[in-house]
Image (cartoon, rainbow, N blue to C red):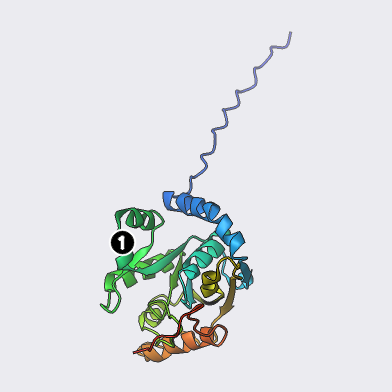
Amino acid sequence: MTPVVAAPETPPVAARAVPRPPAGVRLYRLLVWLGVPLRWWCRLEVAGHDVLPPAGAGVLIVANHDSWLEPLALGDTLMRGGRPLRFLAKDSLWRLRPVAALLDGIRQIPLRRGAGDVAALQAAVDALADGEAICIFPEGTISRGRALRARRGVARLAEAAPEAEIVLAAVAGGTDLLRFPRRPRLHVTLFRATRPLPDPGADHAAYAGALLDEIRQRVPPAAGRGRRPRPAG
């Protein structure tokens, strides 16, 4: 009788651990989900998704800032594309503890405006080098219908992180939210900058101004209903 040779036992297949997204990403997704009614109310439309680089490639979003809706619209737009967007935001937003906890939870970067905040800019540069998405408003504040000059921070970021792609964002319709109960129509247009990266030692102010000019050619400063543009001084 031929002996029966037992087949070697097949080692059990270990369950592959599925990496969990960082806490900041989960919270970001929750906020986007909670913001669906606002997205519907504002009739948000987005054009130019194809200019965004794939996840894992650093991207610097440069946008206009005419209302508080621009950060929400851009954050929603990028997160729906799998790119949690980190903003260089004015540090005064961190004064209230609940707001500070929320901003820290989604890993936003506090920036002291007009103080040459090297630490904040370095945090943004490091994030771009790690393949993250960073947004900066070159005007530094809400325009309120004024033609503001661009601040140098955007040029310093572009120069310090040349591997990151620069994508401009023109956001129109944010100030129309003041026409309640009439629904606004918010439109985000993403497009590539025509200006090449600044050369080392280039005029940062001129470069930042050129990027802002490209955006403002598509969406002029808006003050909102019933408001007159303030002097730019």
At horizontal 38% and vertical 70% (from top left) the residue drawn is 125
Q: Is residue 101 above or below residue 134?
A: above
Image quarter for residue 92? bottom left
Towards the viewer: 162 or 120: 120
At horizontal 49% and vertical 88% (from top left) the residue drawn is 213
At horizontal 58% and vertical 61% (from top left) the residue drawn is 39
Q: Residue furthest right?
A: 1
x and y percentages locating residue 102 in the rendered image: 38, 54
For residue 5, side relative to residue 148 (left or right)? right
Q: Residue furthest left?
A: 115
Q: In this view, does 231 lie above or below 92?
A: below
For residue 140, side relative to residue 53 (left or right)? left
x and y percentages locating residue 105 in the rendered image: 38, 53
- What residue did someone put label 1 on? 94
Whether residue 200 can be seen here: yes
Amino acid type, label 1 = Trp
**Which quadrant of the rendered structure holds the C terminus?**
bottom left
x and y percentages locating residue 112 in the rendered image: 28, 72
For residue 6, side relative to residue 18 (left or right)? right
